[in-house]
Structures are given as C-alpha cells and as structure tokens.
Amino acid sequence: MAFLEVKNLKKSFSKTDALKGISFSLEKGRTLAVIGPSGNGKTTLLRCLNFLEIPNAGTIKLGGKVVFNGSKKLKREDTLWVRDMFGLVFQSFNLFPEYTVLKNVTLALEIVEKRRKKQGKSSLLETASVQDEAKSVLKKLGLESKLESYPCELSGGEKQRVAIARALVLKPSVLCFDEPTSALDPNLTREVVKLIKEIKTKFNITMLIVTHEMKFANRVADDVMFVYDGKALEFGETNEIFERPKTQKLIEFLNINDD
Amino acid sequence: MEQLTDCSKSISANMTFSEISLDLLKGFAVTLQLFFVTLIFAIPLGIILTIIQKCKIKIVKVVIQTFIWVIRGTPLMLQVIAVYYGPAILFEAKMLPRLVAVLVAFIVNYACYFSEIFRGGFDSVSKGQYEAGLVLGMTRPQIFFKVILLQVVKNIVPPMSNEVITLVKDTSLARVIVVAEILKVAGDYTAKGLIWPLFYTAVYYLAFIGILTIIFKCLERKLDYFKV
C-alpha cells in the first residue's frame, strides 16, 4: 500500500489555479522527484503537503490515515501530526540566524519532545539527551566542527546540511526538499546528489524532491513526476520517464533542459 | 503659574554657579521624569498599536492608521496644548494637572512613532522564519518568542535609538504649558537678564544623550553576532 496518497488536490490563489487536481502516490523508502517548469505548481504542492497552504479540494492520505479531505475542516492535531511526519528543507534554508548550528537543531526537538511527553507519545530520542541526539545527526552530516558556528558564518552547502539535520532530528517519515540545488553554486550540484544518496543510506528515509534540474533528478530519484500547469502529466520510474516520455509537453521540457 | 514664580523668586545677581547648576539640575529632574515615564508607557502602548494594526478587521485597521496619521501629522506642541486646554474648551471639564497633560500627549505621540518602528521591525523578518518554525512543529507563540522576537529587536535598535534621543530633546516642549523642565528654568533666568544658563543646559542634554548613545551602541554590538 502506498505510504502517501494524494488525490485530485486543488489549490487556487486569488486569480490563479496553482494546482488543478494532482493525484499521485509514494511508496515507503522511495525517492520521488517532482519536475517541471517554474511556476507550474511544484512548490505549491510541497507547501500543501506541509499545510503551509491549505488545499481547496482533494484528499491527502498519509500512512493509511486521511489527514485532509476537502470537505472537512483541518484539525489542529492533524496539522501537527502531518508536520511531524513531513520534514521540509526550504529552498533558502530558513535557518534561525540568532542561534548556533547546534541550537538550530535542538530548538524544535526540545519543543516537540515536551509536546510528545504531554500527549503520552514515545520519545524521539535514541540517545541520552536532546543535545546528544542533535550532535549525532550533525556528525552524520559532517558538521561536527561547526556546532558553535552561527548561520552567517557557514557556506551555502553547510547551511543546507544544517537545514537537513534540523529536519532529520525530528525523525520525519518523508523528507521534502524544495529546489535543493538552486540556492547553491552550480558546481555544488554533484555534492547535493552525493549528500542525498548518503542521507538515504544513513537514515533510510522516503524523500520527495522538487526540482527543475533534470540531471539532478535523474541521478537521485527512483520515481519522477512531471508537473505541468498544475497537473501531474506523467508519473513513473526515473529511467522510464527520461527515456520514454509520453506527452509532448514532457518531451519539449526534456529537450529544453538538454540544451 | 505656580512653577514660574517658584523659580523666579530665587533669582538674584549674587547667585553662584553651583546654585544655578543645582537649580538647572532640578529642572533636569523634571526632564528625566518626562523622559522615563513617556518611555515606560509608550513602548507597551506602541506594541498594542502594532498588534491592532496587524488585525484582520479592516475597519479597526483604518481607524488606527488614521489615528497614527493624525498624531504623526501634527506638531507635538499642538498636541500638548490640545490635551491641556482641549477638555476645558470642548466639555468645560476640569483641566488635567500640567505634568499629566504633557505626559498623556507625549505617551500617545511616541507610542504612534514606536508602533511604526515595531511594525517595520516585524515586517522585515522573513516569512520563511515563521514557516520554518511551523514545519518543525512549533506553535505560533513559540515561533514568535523563540525565533522572531530577537530578530525584531535587532531590527529596531537603530531607529529606536534615534527616536529615544529625539524624545530627550522633545521634553523641552513641555514649557509651552509652563512645566518647569530644564529649558523652562533656564528661560526664567534669561527673562531676568542672565543668559548663560540657557546655553549651559546643553551640557545636561549632551551628558544624558551621551549615556544613551553608549547604551544603544552596546546593545547594537551585542546583537552584532548574527545577521537577519
């Protein structure tokens, strides 16, 4: 059974329809790349899944539980549960500038731990303390020497790894990336590919990556979804999508990106 | 006119430098009183005005914005006069004590300026900071107090330092309804033919503003370790 099932998801802003009924599903442990030209709804989809935008219609089913159904009002506990299940790494990382790398990672963990304790849920910690937990994740991402640095002292690549650590420490089921290569130097793309593959092996996590870079998607994803004009035009395994595109739009898109 | 007679009675040609200094210091105590009381009340009131401005009900927003426009668009001196004489002229009500009238005008005026500074401080914190907090499972109050607030403080220190220094000098407007702040005390000496105390008041202002400048510079330096 699919871990994440999205059906006919719609979202419109005052004058534009950003999502015109997207449906797809994601299996546990797979990496899905959402590709397509800019301004066609990829990021809106990601934001809807994290409830940063509330969809207008459709259903979202996560781990067998319906968390959004256009007809009913969003419950607070569902919102929190969904956000616990998803981790999101923003395009511009959005680190907290006033805190050190370590504190950036521990801040939300402390809060979520307290909340889970209150709700009688199990702890997220595998180590003795929040600090140790954060340090262990940061070490896995090669940031052990940067614990006391502030975001303004880090390179773009380091900032991204802090943002990833901050999301991973909360043990999400799905880690989402919004354009992970676009805020970095083009020559860092290969590094990001390596990093994402590393995360996959070290953390064994399902990933959803929004990107407009074809080569990058080709290298990291198991599955690819092509989003065009607010709709999912094609969905399939990476090789299949890149080698045998079916729709004219995807063929055009792949050709443009080949040049 | 009780304050007027109060200080003029002591003026004589034989007054020593230290006696006049002490007399001016008493005036400066009134200045400081105006300054600190205004600050203590105008900051929270400014925060309240900022919150109301963020409110989604359009009519409330329009009313507050119009109010701020009127307060920022008219001279503070006129507002002091309005608060002091206004109630008596319009409603034949009892006049407020002079010091209270000045304080009311100052607090309302500065709250409006502060609220605009606070609003700017909030607006310059990126929306991404809220969103990062939300996806990490934090609630809005947690995001505000743990993530946003310090960034706002960093943003508002430079404009607040300007406004606070202006407030020190604006206290001299209280003399328009004969509140015996330092400039009023010095002015009374001038009226009796002794002009140097008037210029000498600059020393008091400079000393106090010097201290404030150092405090604000320290605060700025303390928050210098991060960039918003």
Image: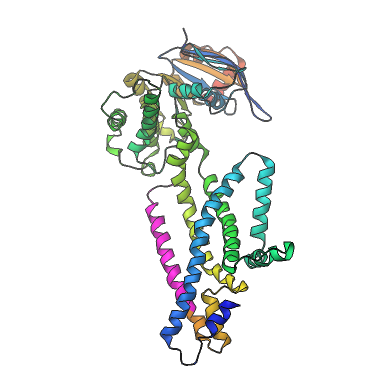
Dominant secondary structure, magenta: helix
On the image, which quarter does residue A150 sit in?
A: top left
Residue A73 forms part of the magenta stretch: no
Most extreme residue toward the left, as rendered? A128
Q: Can residue B20 be seen in the rendering of this structure?
A: yes
Q: Which residues are magenta?
A: B201-228
| Horizontal and vertical percent position of residue A3 | 46, 12
Most extreme residue toward the bottom, as rendered? B13
In the displayed structure image, the side of residue B123 where residue A174 appears, left or right: left
| Horizontal and vertical percent position of residue A77 | 49, 23
Q: Can residue A190 be seen in the rendering of this structure?
A: no
In the displayed structure image, the side of residue A153 where residue B1 appears, left or right: right
At x 63% / y 66%, what residue is drawn?
Answer: B80
On the image, which quarter does residue B103 sit in?
A: bottom right
- Quarter placement of the N terminus of chain B: bottom right
| Horizontal and vertical percent position of residue B75 | 65, 65
Residue B206 forms part of the magenta stretch: yes
| Horizontal and vertical percent position of residue A104 | 37, 36
On the image, which quarter does residue A127 sit in?
A: top left
Residue B140 higher or lower than B125, as above or below: above
At x 52% / y 81%, what residue is drawn?
Answer: B198
Residue A135 higher or lower than A35, as above or below: below
Residue A20 higher or lower than B99, as above or below: above
Q: Nearer the viewer, residue B6 or B191?
A: B6
